[in-house]
Amino acid sequence: MIDLVNVSRLYHRGADEIHALERVSLHVDRGRFVALMGPSGSGKSTLLNALAGLDRPNSGEVTVAGKRLNEMSEDELAAFRAHTVGFVFQFFNLIPVLSAVENVELPLLLTNLSKAERRQRAETALRVVGLSDRADHRPRELSGGEQQRVAIARSIVTDAELIVADEPTGDLDAKNAEEILSLLQTLRRDFGKTVVIVTHDPRAEKWVDEVIHLDKGILLEKRPGGAARGAAGATG
Amino acid sequence: MKYLPLVWRNLGRNPLRSFLTAAAIALAIALVCILRTMPAGLDAVLASAAANTRISTHNEAGIVYSMPYAYLAKVRSVPGVVAAISWNWFGGAIDISKGVEFPNFAVDADGLAEVYADWGVDPKVFEDFRKYRDAALVGRATFEKHGWKVGDVITLQSTVFPVTLSFRIVGEVPTNGGSLYFQREYLAQALAAAGVQFDTLGMIWSRVDDPDRVGPVMRQIDEMFHNSEAITSTETEKSFIGNFFSGLKQLVTIIQIVAALVTLCIVFIAANTASMSIRERVGEIAILKAIGFRKQTIFTTLLAEAGLLALVAGIAGAATAWAMLKGLQMYATGAGPQLGPLTAFIVSRVILVQAVFIAFFIGILAGWVPAFGASRRSVAQTLREVF
């Protein structure tokens, strides 16, 4: 599903050069739940942005769902994101003037679906995340956990193959964080999505199939997560 | 069209700000609409005030310079001239400390009814004017302003001649703004009693029998006095009044320039508001781009916000201008006849459509730069900066 080969990303901050990623190579199979972990400034979000088509590396190759992102124009990348990637961010990032169901419907505005079809799919996505009864509420009327569920519903409404989440539990309490991680695992398990999250949250390890550690832009370690160990235990 | 609800909702994000911006645009548009009625309105006023067979003869040096009274007889003898009368500025004041409150003229009684047959004055009134040496005809505005009645006697002290005269009001001139007219003979006798010679006139107004003969008659009059002590200049009433209004037209031009500058200021205000509104939600815009909105889509929706707000404001402004002038017209034709000329100032459909387009253009112009900037921002960089 995801193939990164020798990906490097360099930023300029004033006169300083910041090596956010240095020759990172990574392969993630379809239907895996992967956590990118590491200290602040380790390059986790940069790596996530690169594989989600939000940012272009200075060198190296990024291939996602069979598409080589390096060769795409900005509009092609936008179309790639619209069809292939679902996004979840730390601060929920819903549009405050739209209701929950309208927020979920947003990515569908980029499709040729009719208004009725868009609404139907948005309601289905809200049902998947357990928020059917909150469809008409504005974001300010929802709790943090509920807002993040709406964001997850928005990420799956286009039936994207890849779900990327940047600190999805970063602004949630323990109970809500567990629920969100459980929901992301459900997406992987029941819907076959490939899920990549960036997190500082150690609780995430038990839900994911694989943990990838980065530091100072270098991929340090790949190890199985709790879900993979559990599965191995169950089969072993 | 599917983005319209999103655009509309974003306008409602900060209702007070949207309202104030729209109000500023609407006010500017209303102002533009009203000012745009002025050139056509002034032309209409001129057309309604001027008869096409009435001509004016005055000293070529200017209307403040007099001419010999003997000119009147010569003008009356020109073929095609049906009637002619002289005018002299009397400059009479009710209270000399307040100055001249309304124009007043000494005119010839003979020929007045023929020269001003379009005044709408009853022939009986013209007859009274001829009959009574101290008779006065008063324009409706002045008549109503002072609450005068037919039969009232008023006294005017001249600021031009060393006399004070009392006048008996014999009637009003319904179609005239507010001037007072009295017999030249009355003034001549008063001046003779005071030992002042009075053998000049300020202006001659003549009626020509056929509109097609107006040009030749005017030429003939001026040729007649070409080598005399006071060379004349004859023009049609419309041209004469138009010269009076020329200063006003220049003022209207200046007002229109000011209105254009005000409109430009509104563009800057609207641009600043659009810029603030967009800057407040760079994060949201970055999210939209992240989920696949192309920069052209972002640009178009942001521009549509500014355009839609300005369009609504433009419609409101144009409607306000239309309602204001309509209301004034209704008042002028009813309770306030002194505002009669205002009925000529009409917000036409063309002006309304132009105003709405101007408003839309203001919105597009104001939204262009901030929308363009926001649509081109890098998603990853914005996400790093904002979150």
Image (spheres, coloured by chain):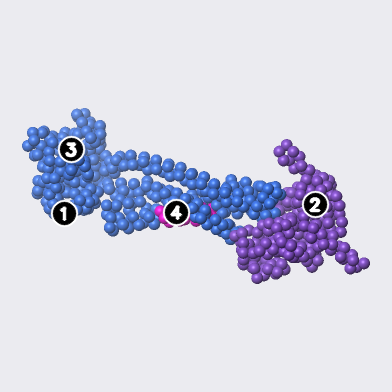
Question: Magenta segment, which residues?
Answer: B307-321
* Residue at mark 2: A38
Q: Residues within 10 Å of mark 4 (few under 14, many from 20)?
A: many
* Residue at mark 1: B149
Q: Nearer the viewer, residue A62 or B285?
A: B285
Name the subunit of mark 3.
Answer: B
The numbered dot on residue B83 is none
- Callout 2 amino acid: Gly
Asked if badge 2 and badge 1 are on a common chain, one would say no
Pointers 3 and 4 in contact (C-beta within 8 Å): no
Specify the farthest residue to the right.
A236
Which chain is assigned purple? A
Point 89% across, 65% down: residue: A232
Residue A166 located within the stretch drawn in magenta: no
Q: Residues within 10 Å of mark 1 (few under 14, many from 20)?
A: some
Residue B21 visible: yes
> In the drawing, does residue B148 fall left or right of residue A79?
left
- Callout 1 amino acid: Lys
Point 68% across, 48% down: residue: B385
Q: Nearer the viewer, residue B227 or A210?
A: A210
Which chain is assigned blue? B
* Residue at mark 4: B317
Measured along the vertical axis of the image, is residue B117 above or below residue A102?
Answer: above
The answer to which image quadrant residue B249 occupies is top left
The numbered dot on residue B159 is 3
Residue B222 visible: no
> In the drawing, does residue A178 fall left or right of residue B164?
right
Name the subunit of mark 2.
Answer: A
> In the drawing, does residue B161 fall left or right of residue A4?
left
> In the drawing, does residue B225 fall left or right of residue A134?
left
Q: Nearer the viewer, residue B213 or B201?
A: B201
Residue B320 located within the stretch drawn in magenta: yes
